[in-house]
Image (cartoon, rainbow, N blue to C red):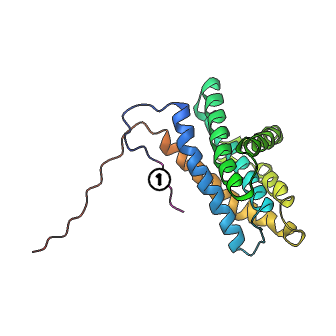
Amino acid sequence: MRIKSHWFKADREKSPQEVAGALAFTIWRIADNALKNTRKANFEIAIGPQYFSFLTEFLVFLVQVADRVAHRQLSAEDRYTFTSTLANRVAETLAENQSRLMGNSLAAHKQRFIDILNQRAGEYADFNYGSDGPEFAFTRYLAYCMREVMDEKDVEWVIDQMMSIAAPEAVEMVEATMRNLYESEPRPTRTRKVTSGD
């Protein structure tokens, strides 16, 4: 999965809100990609509540990852602003999709995601996330949460899918995206190769 994670104009330092807004779009794509890849790996995830439960747990995990990366880079105040903005943008995107497919109000879907995020934030807080990424228990907790989402026949297998494939790939993408979004130097311009008609 290719991700665009550089600013078009890197002429000034971006605010925590701007970085969060850009990252929210990427995080949605990462979660959606993880869902598609899990289904391709022959896990049954039915369109409807199960589909959105999977996305919710994976998005919560990604917001936690982004928050831990922000902890390494930002002041406490900027980290709070960044994570709050990110959580709200992700919640809005999920709510829009959920409301379109399942009905109910945007506000109800958004609030449900925020409630789950707040609950999980307290649970993920027990696990470490260092300069080299999350500890084993951090990704294992995602796998544990996914057990509640999957059908009984997939419960045992989803642990390996999350810990060996989905979570490491997602963490790597979030880390790389945030690294690029916080770059202050403009990217070198790429020269286009032009084919001559001679």
Q: Quadrant of residue 186?
A: top left
- Residue that appears at 42% across and 43% down: 7
Give the extent of the magenta segment: 1-5
The 10 Å Cα crowd at callout 1, few under 14, some 14 to 19, many 20 or more, is: few
Which residue has dot 1 on it?
Answer: 4
Q: Nearer the viewer, residue 23 or 102?
A: 102
Quarter of the C terminus within the rendering? bottom left
Q: Nearer the viewer, residue 32 or 121?
A: 32
- Residue that appears at 70% across and 57% down: 167
The answer to if 2 sits in the magenta stretch is yes
Residue 73: x %, y % from top left:
58, 33
Left or right of 134 on screen, residue 70: left
Residue 182: x %, y % from top left:
49, 38
For residue 103, above or below residue 46: above
The answer to if 26 sits in the magenta stretch is no
For residue 1, above or below residue 187: below
Q: Nearer the viewer, residue 16 or 191?
A: 16
Residue 69: x %, y % from top left:
63, 40
Left or right of 95 on screen, residue 82: left
- Residue that appears at 76% across and 58% down: 54
| Secondary structure predominantly adopted by residues drawn in magenta | loop
**Local secondary structure at mark 1:** loop
Quarter of the N terminus within the rendering? bottom right
Identified by mark 1, the residue type is Lys
Left or right of 184 on screen, residue 99: right
Residue 96: x %, y % from top left:
65, 49
- Residue that appears at 75% across and 57% down: 102
Residue pushed farthest left?
198
